[in-house]
Image (cartoon, helix red, strand yellow):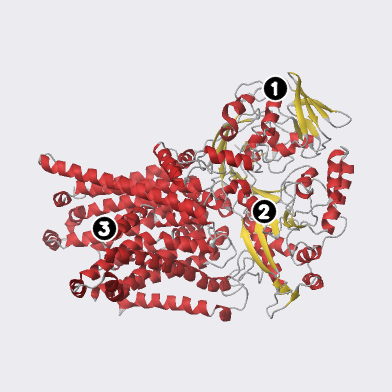
Amino acid sequence: MRHHLPLLLSVGWLLIVLGVSIAAPMISQVNPLHPVAEPLLSPSQHPPLGTDALGRDVWTRIVYGGRLSPGSSFAAMAITVVVGGIAGLIASSLGGWFDRVIVWLSNSLLAIPGLLLAMLLVAAMGPRLLTVILAVGFGGAPGFVRLSRTMFHQIREQNYVTASVALGANRTWIAIHHLLPNAKNQLLSLATTHYAWAFMGTTTLTFLGLAGDPSIPEWGVMLNAGRAHLIDAPWLALWPGCAISLTILAIHRLGAWLSQREEGY
Amino acid sequence: MKHRRLIPLIILIFLFVSTSTACSIGTKESSTLVYGLTLSPTGIDPHLNASSELGIPLASVYDTLVFRDPASGEFVPGLSETWSISPDGLTYTFFLRRGVTFHDGTIFNAQAVQANLEYVMNPDHHSQKAQFMLGPLQEVEIIDDYTVALYLSEPFAPLLDSLSDVYLGMASPVALETWGPTEYQFHQVGTGPYRFVEYIPNDKITLTRNPDYAWAPSIYQNAKAKIDTIVFRFYEDPATRAIALESGEVDVIGEIPPHDADRIAVSSDFDLYPIAIPGQPMQFFFNTKKAPTDAALVRRALIHAINRPQAVKTIFGVYSPVADSPFLASSFNLEPQESFPTYDPETAGTLLDEVGWRITDEEGHRSRNDVPLELHIVAPPWGSNSEMAQLIRADWEAIGARVTLEIAPGFGPLKEAQAEGEYHAIGINLFGTDPDLLRSFYSSTGLYNWSQFEDPEIDRLLTQAAQESLDLDARLNLYEQVSSRVQEEALVLPIRNYVNLVAVNNRVEGLHFTAQGWYPILIDLQLAP
Amino acid sequence: MVSHSDRSSIGALTTVGRRFIEGVLTAWTAVSLTFFALRLIAGDPIASLLSQGLASPDQVENLRRSLGLDAPLFVQYLNFLAGFFRGDLGTSLFTGRPVSTVIVEQLPATAQLAFAGLGFALLFGLTLGVISAWKEETPLGQFAASLAGLATALPVAFTGILGLILYRQLLVVIPLLSVVKIRRLFLPALLLGFASAGAIARVVQAGLKETMKGPYILAARARGIEHGFRLLWHALRPALPPVVSLTALEAAFLFAGTVVTETVFSRPGLGRLLVTSILQGDYPIAQGLVVLAAVFYTISHMLADILAFTIDPRLRRVT
C-alpha cells in the first residue's frame, strides 16, 4: 500500500486542479485581472495567498491558472497525439516507402530539441498563447511519431493481427479494427507521459514571455512576473512554481503507473 | 590504493567544473568600476540609434560642441570655444577649440564637424533621432580649419540644445568613414575623457581612461578621469538588479524597482539617487482616427476612469510624481492652464452615457447600437509600461469597456503596431531637454503623432515656438497654449514623471549627472580607498 | 587494439563512415524542413521592415533583390544552402549584421555555461545513480532516486528562481559568496546541471543494477564491505558506455536549457539571443540558431555512437 501513496497523492492533486478549475467562478468571486487590494500583501495580510505587484488576488489567479495552464498544455498534447499518432499509424500500417519517409522526417526533426522547435514556430507565428499551444503541439510531434510507430509495430506482431494479414485483410481495415482498439491503453499511457512534457513546454514558453499578454492568469506567466519580487515577496514566484512542479510530478507519476500496468499486462 | 581509479575521475570532473567556473571570475582591480545598464539596445551608435541607455557610457566617449550646465540650464563651451547666431536665427557659426585630438589620433577641426553632421543627415543611414534633432539644417560650411557655419532653412530654437546632447557627439571622421553605419557602433572613436574599447551585444561595453584628455568643459569637476576601466553590463531583468548590486557584481545601477529601492535607501552600504529625467511623462496616446476614441468625450471619459495616483503608487511607490500635464517635464516648468481631469468613474460613466455608450447587460458592459465598447491597448515593454497598461485595462473594464492588451516586445514591433493602426491607446514617450520635443508628438506631420490628430492651431503654435524667438519665456508661453489645446481635446493620458532610481555602492564617490538626466559624468567618479 | 584483424577495423571504418553520411543527411533534412516551414508560415521576412518605418518601399525592393528574395522559393533554398556551407547564415533584419557574427559573439558565454552545466550534470548524475543503485534498499538510496526523479520533473525556470531566492538569503549570512562571483556562472551552471542529472542518474542506476547481479560482484559483496569502492568501479565500468552517449546527447539538449537559465540569471548568450530575436521578429537569427542546434546535435549524436562503439567491444562484433 505504501507504494501506492505517491500515486494516490498524484491523482488527488490532479483531481483538485480539475475540480478547482471547473468551479473557479464559484471558488473566487473576484476578477483575476483586476486589483482588489494594496499591492504585495503577504499571505497573512490578505489570505490565503496574498496579492501580486498590481494588487490582484493571487489565490484567484492561481485558481484561474488551473484552467489556463493545464488546459492549454492539454490542447498542445492533444495536437501532438493526433498528429504524431496518425503519422505513426500510417507509417506502421502502410509500411514501405511511407514508413521510410515518415521515419526519416521525424528522426531528422528530432535533431532539433523539441523546445527549440516550438520556439521557432512561435517566432514564425508571433507571440500569443494560441501560437504557444500550436507550437508545443507540433514541436512534440516528431518524438511522438517514433513512439507510436514502435507501439503499432508491436501490436502488428501479435498473432491475431498476423493472422488477419494472412487472411488477406485490407491494411486500412486492420488499422481501424485491430491496431487502434488494441493500442487504446498504450496510447493513453504514452499520451499521459507526453502530457508532462507538453505541460513543461507550455509553461516554459509562457514563462519566457512568448504568450504576449502579461496579464493572463497563467502559471508560467505568473512565475515570470514573480521574479521581480524574489526578495520582498518570494511567494509570488513560489505559488505558481509549486503548482507547475506538482502538476508535472503528478502527471509523471500517473504516466509511470499507466506504463507499468501496461507492461505487467 | 583501493580507490585509485574512481578518484581521478571525480577529481577530473571537479577540475572541469571549477576551471570553467573560475575563468570568468578573475579579480577586480581597484580602478575598475562596473556600471549596470538596464536596457540592451539594438544598436548603440548615438548618431543613428535613439535609445537613452546608450548615452550612459557614450556621453563620456564623446565631447559635444557645447555643453549644458545641469544646474542653470545655460550653454557652456565644449569643443566650440565661442559661437554666434545671426539675428535672423538662420546661421550658427562655431569657433572651434584647437589642439583637440580624437582617440585614434585624428585632429578635431571644422572638417570633422562637417563629416559628423553629414553622416547623421545621410538618408541611407536612417538616423532614428540625431537627424531630427538638427531640424531644418540645410548646409554645413567650412569657413576655415577651425570655424564652421551651419545654415538653416528656417529658424530653429532647439539647435544648441541638440548640439549639447550625445546624439550629436563628435566622432572621428576617419572611423566613421572606415567602418560605415552598421559596424561603426563597435568601433566608436570620440574625443571624450573615456575611450571606447569594446561592445559585445547583450554582454558588455568597456571604456578605458583617456590619458590625453585636456579639454574638459566647465561642467566637469575633474580635468582627467580617475578610474582606469569602466565596464557596463546589461541587467534588463529588473528582478536581478538589486541582487547584482548587493552581491558586489556592480557598483552603480539604474532603474532599481521601487520595492528594492526602499531597502537600499536605508542600507548603510549603498546609496539611492532618485534622478528626475527631463522629457515627457509616461503617457498613452488615444487614437483619434478609430472609433470609439475618435470622440473627444469618450477620450475624456477614459481619462476620468483611471485612478492615476493609485496606479502610480502601486507601481512606482513613493518616488514618482503623478503627471498632471500632457507634457511636463521637470526642466520645462510648464504649468497646465486648467486642472487636469481627476479620477472620477461616475463622471466617466455619465460622459459615456451622453454619447450613447450605455450599459446593456447585467455584467455592466457598455454598447451602442449593439456595438460593444471595445478598446485595444498597445504598450511598450520597457519602464513598467506593461504593468501600467494592465492597471489601465482594469480601470476601463470597471466602467464597462471590454479591453484587450498587447505588449509590443520592442521599439520595432511597437512602431509596427502603430502603423497597423488597430490600437485605441498606445504608450510612447521620449526624453529631452528642449520642449521642441513636443513637435514630433503633436504636430500633424510629427513622426510620433500617434494620436493621429491634425490641428492647424497646434501646428501653428509649435512652429512659432521653434522659430520665433530664442527667448525661453516667450517659447514656454506658446507651449502652454499647446498644452491647453491638447488637454481640451484629451489626446493623451499622462501617467507619471520619470524618476530614475540609481543605486550606488558607497565606495563610489562623485556621482552626478548631465542636464539630460540619464547620463552620469564619468570623469568625476572615483573609488574610495 | 592492435590484436584486431584488418577486416574488423575495415568493418569499423565503414560503420563510422555510414554513421557519418547518415548524420549529414539528417542535419540536411532538419535544416531544409525548418527553412521551408518558416518561409511558408512567416512569409516575407522583409515586409515587417516596411511597416516599422525602418526602410522606404524603394529600399525594401533593393534589399529584397540584394538578398535574393525576389527569386523563386526553390532558388532561395539553394542560395540558403550554398550560404550555409560558406558559413553565411543570412542577415539580421534589425541590425543588418551577419547572423553568423552575432552568433559567434554570444557563443562563448553559452559554451561556458553549458560546459560547466555538463560537468555538474555528470557529477550529480553519477553520484545519484550510484547511490540509488548501491544503497537501493536504504532510505539514502531511495532519497537519491527520488531526487533524480525530481531533477527531471522540476522546470529549470522554477529551480533557477528557488536558487536565486536561496542565494540571496545565504548572501546575508555568508558575505564570502559575493566575493567570488558565484551568481553569474556557478549558480546557473549548477541548476542547469541538476536539470540534466536525472536522465544520467537513471541510466547509471539501471546499468549498475544490471552488472551488480553478476556472480563475481555478488560473491565479492558477500565477502565484506571493505572492497566497496573497488567493486563499485568494476560494476560501474560496463555501465558507462550508455552514460557516455547520453552525456553527448544531453550536451545538445543543454542548449535548450540555457534559454531559460540565461533568462532567469540575466546572463548573455545564445539562449537570450533566441528569445529576444523571437520577440522582435528577427527570425533569420532564430533560424540560424536552430540550424546550429541541429548541426550540433547531429555531430554529438554521431560522436556518441562512435565513442560507445570504441569503448564497448561487444558493439563492434555486432556490426
Q: Would you say C27 lies left or right of C212 here?
A: right
Q: Say what amino acid the circle numbered 2 marks.
A: Gln
Q: Mark 1 points at which residue?
A: B111
Question: Toward the viewer: B501 or B343?
Answer: B343
- Where is residue C308 shown, x and y percent of the image? 23, 49
For residue B432, say whether it is visible. Answer: yes
Q: Would you say C237 lies left or right of A56 here?
A: left
Q: Would you say B390 lies left or right of C134 here?
A: right
Q: Say what amino acid the circle numbered 1 marks.
A: Gln
Which corner quadrant of the image does residue A247 belong to? bottom left
Q: Which residue is at a point 45% across and 41% down the rendered structure image?
A: C89
Q: Mark 2 points at which residue?
A: B418
Alpha carbon distance from label 2 to label 3: 56 Å
Q: Say what amino acid the circle numbered 3 marks.
A: Val
Q: Do the residues labelled 2 and 3 touch (CB within 8 Å)?
A: no
- Where is residue C167 shown, x and y percent of the image? 48, 55
Question: Toward the viewer: B502 or B189?
Answer: B189
Alpha carbon distance from label 1 to label 2: 40 Å
Q: Tell us which disc is closer to us: 3 or 1.
A: 1
Question: Toward the viewer: B515 or A174?
Answer: A174
- Where is residue A142 shown, x and y percent of the image? 36, 59
Q: Would you say C205 lies left or right of A59 here?
A: left
Which corner quadrant of the image does residue B469 belong to? top right
SS at mark 3? helix
Q: Which residue is at a point 54% across and 46% down the rendered structure image?
A: B248
Q: Name the residue under label 3.
A: C204
- The tag earlier along the polypeptide, 1 or 2, is 1
Kindly identify which numbered label has been placed on residue C117: none
